[in-house]
Image (cartoon, grey):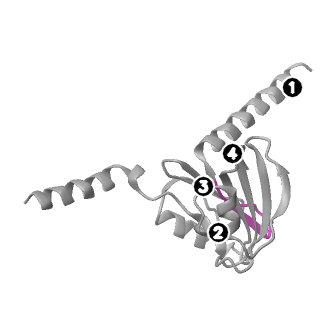
Amino acid sequence: MKLIKAVLFILLAVVAFPAFAEEPKPLGIALGTPLDEVKRVLADRPFQDNGINRYTSGPMYVVDGKGLGVSDLQSVLLVFDADRRLAALRMTMDVGGLGKPNFDRVLTHLKERYKAGRIVNPPVGNKEAEFQTSGVQISVDAPHMSFQMTVAYMTKALFQQIKADAAEQGKKKADEGKRF
């Protein structure tokens, strides 16, 4: 009887507290993974240096997306923090043709696994979606008239920093407009 109660308690905890759910591992790599480990996982591809990220003060690299198990994946941008831990991973992929079928495929995949936030999926126009877990923000962006779309995974801390910077830039722009 105690065993049954314990199992029921664990099941209830997992259902009631999504924080216990596993964090995403895009391409088999969790955010927070050290750079050396990411290089080991992607050992068969060259890492192209892409500078230092202005938000994390860490290095950025681009790797070729072909052969990583995601159809139409073109490239992957890896953003590390100052401690050389993965803070964001952005996949650039082909939209898959008219109507952007890859957006719909990715949207369905993410809806099955994560809590959906804002979803904009018109028949024609920009397509966007946001998902989140306890520590990761996921965004999908397929601009109208573009042949590419992006799927980005980033730590919530990085997401909040970027969001705050965008708000500050918007306020500065609005203040400049009032001067004239």
- x and y percentages locating residue 166 in the rendered image: 74, 37
The dominant secondary structure in magenta is strand
Which of discs 1 and 3 lies nearer the camera? The answer is: 3
Q: CA distance from mark 1 to mark 3?
A: 39 Å
Q: Which residue is depicted at the point 39% across and 53% down? A: 20
Residue beneath label 1, please? 177
Q: Is 176 in the magenta?
A: no
Query: In the picture provided, is 177 more to the left or to the right than 101?
Result: right
Cα–Cα gap, marks 3 and 2: 22 Å
Mark closer to the chain start, 4 or 2: 4
Q: Along the line of sight, which residue is nearer the eye, 111 or 122?
A: 111
Disc 4/disc 1 C-alpha distance (Å): 39 Å
Residue at image position (35%, 49%) is 17
Closer to the eye: label 4 or 3: 4
Q: Are marks 2 and 1 in contact (CB under 8 Å)?
A: no
Q: Which numbered tag is attached to residue 31?
A: 3
Whole-angstrom CA distance, mark 4 to mark 2, is 33 Å
Q: Name the front one of labels 3 and 2.
A: 3
